[in-house]
Every structure is written in structure tokens, then in C-alpha cells.
Amino acid sequence: MLQSLDLPDFVAFTETWLDRGTERCELSGYHLVSRLDRRYAIRTDRGGIALYVRDGLQNSVVHIGDSGTDERSWHIIHANSGPILLCVWYRRPDTGETASIQRFEQEYETYSKQAVSFLAVGDFNIHNKDWLRFSSHNSPEGVELEHVCCTHGFTQHVKSPTRGTNLLDLVISDFQSGVTCKVTPGIHDDDHRGVLTKVSVEIPASEPVKRRVYNFKKANWDQLRGSLLAKDWRAILAGTPDDATADMTQVILDIVAEHIPQTWITDKVYAHPWLNDNCRVALERKHAAEGTADFPRHRDECSQTFLKARSDYAAKTREDLKGMSRSSRGWWKLADTLLARAGTRENIPPLQRPDESWALNAEEKAEELARVFRSKSQLPTVEQNEYSELPEPETAGMRQGFLRLRVRTVYKVLKNLDENSGTGPDLLPARILKRCARELALPVTLLARKLLREHRWPSCWRQHWIHGIYKRGSKALGKNYRGVHLTPQLSKVVERAIGSLFIPWLESVEAFGANQFAYSKGKGYKDTLTINVNNWILLLEQKFLVGVYCSDVSGAFDRVSRDRLCAKLRTLGLHRDVLGFLSSWLEERASTVVLGGRNSELEALLDSVYQGTVLGSPLWNVFYADSSKPLRKCGYSETAFADDLNCWKAFRKVPRPKGVQGPLPTHGPLLADLRGAQRELHLWGEANQVFFRPRQGVIPDPTPHAALRAAF
């Protein structure tokens, strides 16, 4: 049987049925690493585990301990990518028994300090239909094991039944990718099947990605500024808005190329971000010592070197995090390196498509992510109701006439750019725009005035690069990633400059809504939290019950009807040039997912306020502002932070009759009132093609009752 499987390096057995009466159990071509015989067996023909390693590899694996209670053994495999913790476990069938799983977690937390990654195999005898699919029911032990896996970021890799129609034999690891499992025939036809697991534990990088970058250390900034200052921009700006924008960008890039050298670099993504030269030297010594008496010593030194490198990297990263703001991009990037302990080839592993096929290489994964992002941006069907009609346009709006866009405004925007902000599809870095702010302020101002005057957003700024960022859940499913958009830095400069002409006016007339605290000057999430909590505490102190409904929009920003938003903008009394410019800005764009040096096919972007832009956030506030109408109609107070809308209402308590148990008599009417507010908000959503996520209501109550808490 093992020969038919190409003689795997390790063989783990469960239910060996061995006891003290059997002194030796040989397996041809293999070396016994550990053996733990039956414990507390209800039946005499169950239990026992053993681990074998192929001859020649026995010096690379060490048995480090057994569970004091359960049939579970722990080992360290000294692999090329660092020590791997291997657990072999037979959990006897025992419905409702969860203590062994809790002990498993405790033992893992103890032994994992000796390893950089983790793998567990065995017969777990659990059922969890929601997690494993091939189960007859949801058992307490199945739910408990799923909880442990979610807590530690483990993935279960076996995807087919292993006994009858049930999946009982599992392979669990913290590898991000590089683990494949195949169910094979078992020793007995009427018993458990085998599971062949292949794990990629090599150090080499994934396919290298070559990038052309500027060598800013050798930049001649004085000559660059002089060349930009001497350039006559009038001929460039005389063309159409599309031509003027594309030509200006290209001219800047051409001048930059004369004064800042460029070089090609190759990005190499290794299995672990903390690998250093000491690790590679220790690995070379271990390999050189194979077959000698010194091998065990070099093997252990190699593993200790890997552990020290990881520990030092984690300590340094934590210190770096302490000095950074949690709201910064760098903080989250560093934090992710600590969480992703056992990656192998790429940040995004192979992705499973809906037809259960797999996207394996960078191009296939980019296409799968593009499909997912496209599906998340589809508008729901519009419904006509009482919230469909919009108010008449404001007669006293913005002052019409000349809009004064000053050079000093554009200079300030350029000077305040973040040099580390990502470069967009135009390949013009923010660092160059920032350091040449004085020389570029005038031509960029003239370009912005032209675009505003001619009501045009240029074609070359309508392409978005999208990068997939993991959110939660299985990393093998594209739906668990969100797209981060990169747009040209110069386009965002123009957006900020033109936005300075009308966004302050929108804020002054409360066009974002009276209680919107996101994307507004001088407001933030702390204000929302303070207002909500203080209002609720005050009402509770006044002996009221407080009913709270919290809503959240599905696909906010990505699902915004252009026609509806333009209609709302027309009611605000904006300057005609601003209206014309925003109408063009909201027109169709194109996006491509970028991954591992590969791009997906271009996808149309429409009916959106476009992530990765400056004007998208205030435009969302305008679109969402009248969502408060249905709530106020029902007598609720509200606050909003972007698409998170919270509303509440006070209810007088009705005393409970003496001797009567259960919720207060007030609870029934309170719940009915909350459901009414929810229905009204959803009616507004149907009229505006906005879909609210289900199950987002909560009710704080000084005397909580299970039925009340579960109502939403």
C-alpha cells in the first residue's frame, strides 16, 4: 500500500489496537518514532497511535512528549523551513466530550514555543456540518474544535469523507498554503480510509517579480526642479482634457527619467519574513553533516537558529509597532507579518472557484479575485416607494460665477503628500510630486481649472489597480478578500484641489447629514461613540428602556447608483461647473487586479463612488445623508459613521405584575417598534438601491432577557 503512495516520508497510524503484550511492531523501510498504546478504551479493539518515518530521515524528527490523559503524541520535524510541530491524535468517539479538545489546545500552546509552524493529523471523531460538510450533525466537540482552529488560525485541509459519508480523519495546520490532501483506500474496506498529505516546506521563493524602481539616493533634485520650472506648459494645456492630462504626465515622467536613474529589482517572497543569513548558514551545515555523527548536533543548532531568528524578528516588529499609529498602513502591514507564522509560497494561497476547481498561479488568482469583486458590486433592483421622490433643488445654493482655484492651494496639497503612499497606474510616485511641489503647482493648477471648466475627468485617470487584502475566514476563498484600489497620485492632487472649492460648503449646509461623523473636518469615530454611549446612559439613568437598532450597508461605496447620486447632487444647489465635473467623475471606469506581477483582464467599474479616490468619501456622505428620514419618521435619534447607522429610542417601563416571570410588558411593544424602524430603513434602501446586511440589530437593556437579546 505504501509503495502505491510513493513511500511517504511519514506514516501516522490511529487505532493500532496495540497494548503491552506487543513488544515490537515493525514497518518495512520505516523507523518507529513514537508509539502510544490504548488508554481508557471503552472497547478493547479501539485506540492506540504510532508514528513512523522513512529510513534515512529518522534523525530529522524527535518525539517530544505525549498527552498525560489522551491518545495524543507530539513531535518536532527539523525541516528546511524551520522546526515543525507535528501532533498525532486518536480521539475516541464520545458525544459531548470537549475536555480533550481543551487539553489539546493547552498542549499546543506549550509545545508550539519550540516550532515555527504546526500540523496535526489523526482520527478526531467529530461532527460539524457547517465546518466539515461531510458530517451527520453538529456535535459539541465539533463546534469546540472549530472554535480552537479559528482562535489560532488553523486550517482543516481534508475535503472528502474518510469513513462512509462522514469526514472524521482531519489534517489541521497553520500553513497559509502548500498543503494538499488526498483520501486513499484504507487497510480494511469497511473501515477508515487513509489520508495522503503533502506539505511544501522548502525555503525557496515563489516566482520572482521584477519591478523597475527609481533610485532616489542618486537623484539630482536641483536639476530636476530646474527642468520642470523651465518647461513651457501652455502647448500641452491647449489640447483636450484627455490629451492635456496624458501629455503632462508623460512630460513629467520624461523629465524625471533624465535626472533620477532607474533600476530593476526582483522581489523574492520567502517562506518566512524573518529568514536571514544565519538561518541559511545553519541549514547548509545541517545538510553537510547528514550521515555523520555530528548531524544531531547540527540539526538541533539549525532549529535553534530558526527559532531565535523568528523570536528576534517578532520582538523587533513589536517594538516597531509601539512607535507607529494603529491607523497607519505600516502598522497593519507589520502586524500581518506577526500573524502569518507559517506561510510558504505567496501571500495569497491557491483560491478555490465556485465549481471547486483551483486558481493556482498568479494570473488565475487575479482573475478569480476580479470575478469576486465584480459580483460584490452589482446593484440591487430599484423599488418605487415613498422614499423615491427627492426634494426640489435648492434656490439659494453655492454662489455661481467664477470659481477661484488658487496656486497656493495646489501647492499646499502637493507639499502635504505622503511620500510612502502607493504609486498608481500612471507610475508617477508621490515622492516626486511632493519634492517638486513648487515647480509643479502652477501647471497642475492650470490643469485642474481646465478639467473643472470643461466638466471632464480624463480617461487616463479612469483605470484602477486593485490589490486583494485578506479579511477573515478561509484564505482559500476569494470572497474573504477585499479590494484595495490604487489610483494615480496626480489625480488625487486634482481631486483635493477641486474638492476644496465645494466640500467646505457642503459641510456648512449639512449636506452630509446633521449627525454624520465620518469624512468631515473636526469629527471622528470617537465623537460617534461618545454621543451614543452618553445618550444611552442618560436615558438608562432616567429609568427608561433603550431600544437600539444598528445597521450596516452591504457593499457600501461599491454599490452606489450614479443616476440617483447625480439627482441628489442637483438638489443641493452646487455650482454648475462642480455638478458637470462630478457627473463626469462618476462615469464608468476600468479596473484590473494586480497579483504577483500579473494582471487580470480589465473589468468595468460603474455605479460606485470609487475606492482609492479623494472625492468618493464625501460623495458617499451626500448619497447616504437622507437615510435618517425613515428613522426620524419613527421617532428615533441617530448617528452615522460612513455606512454604519445607529439609532435609538427611549421607552417607558411598564411594571411587571407581582409573581409574573419573564420579560417586562414593555418588551413586546419595544421590539415591534424596532422592527418598524428597520422596515422603514429597508424601504429607503429599496428606493436607493442600497442593501443592508441582515442580523445587525442590538438592544442594550439594564435588565436583559434572552428572548429580547436574540430578537435581532
Image (tube, rainbow, N blue to C red):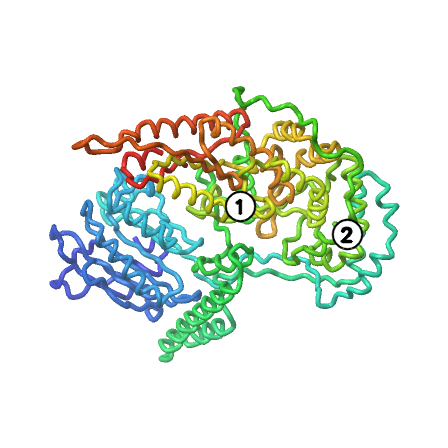
Task: Please give the residue where the numbered disc 1 appears in the rendered image.
Answer: 365
The residue most toward the bottom is: 293
User: Residue at horizontal 73%, vertical 68%?
Assistant: 218
Label 1 to label 2: alpha-carbon separation: 45 Å
Residue 448 in which image quadrant: top right
Does 8 appear above or below 241? below
Residue 340 in which image quadrant: bottom left
Q: Secondary structure at mark 1?
A: helix
Residue 29 is at least partly visible in this image: no
Residue 19, numbered circle: none
Q: Is residue 396 left or right of residue 348?
A: right
Give the amino acid at mark 2: Arg
Q: Is residue 321 left or right of residue 228?
A: left
How far from the left and from the top, in percent, is residue 59?
34, 71
- Of labels 1 and 2, earlier in sequence is 1
Tell me if label 1 and label 2 are in contact, CB under 8 Å: no
User: Residue at horizontal 34%, vertical 36%?
Assistant: 545
Q: Nearer the viewer, residue 656 or 67?
A: 656
Q: Residues within 10 Å of mark 2 (few under 14, many from 20)?
A: some
Residue 451 in which image quadrant: top right
Q: Residues within 10 Å of mark 1 (few under 14, many from 20)?
A: many
Front position among marks 1 and 2: 2
Does 385 appear above or below 223? above
Q: Secondary structure at mark 2?
A: helix
Q: Is residue 525 left or right of residue 155?
A: right
How far from the left and from the top, in percent, is residue 103?
24, 58
How far from the left and from the top, in percent, is residue 617?
60, 41
Give the amino acid at mark 1: Lys
Task: Please give the residue where the numbered disc 2 appears in the rendered image.
Answer: 408
How far from the left and from the top, in percent, is residue 43?
12, 50
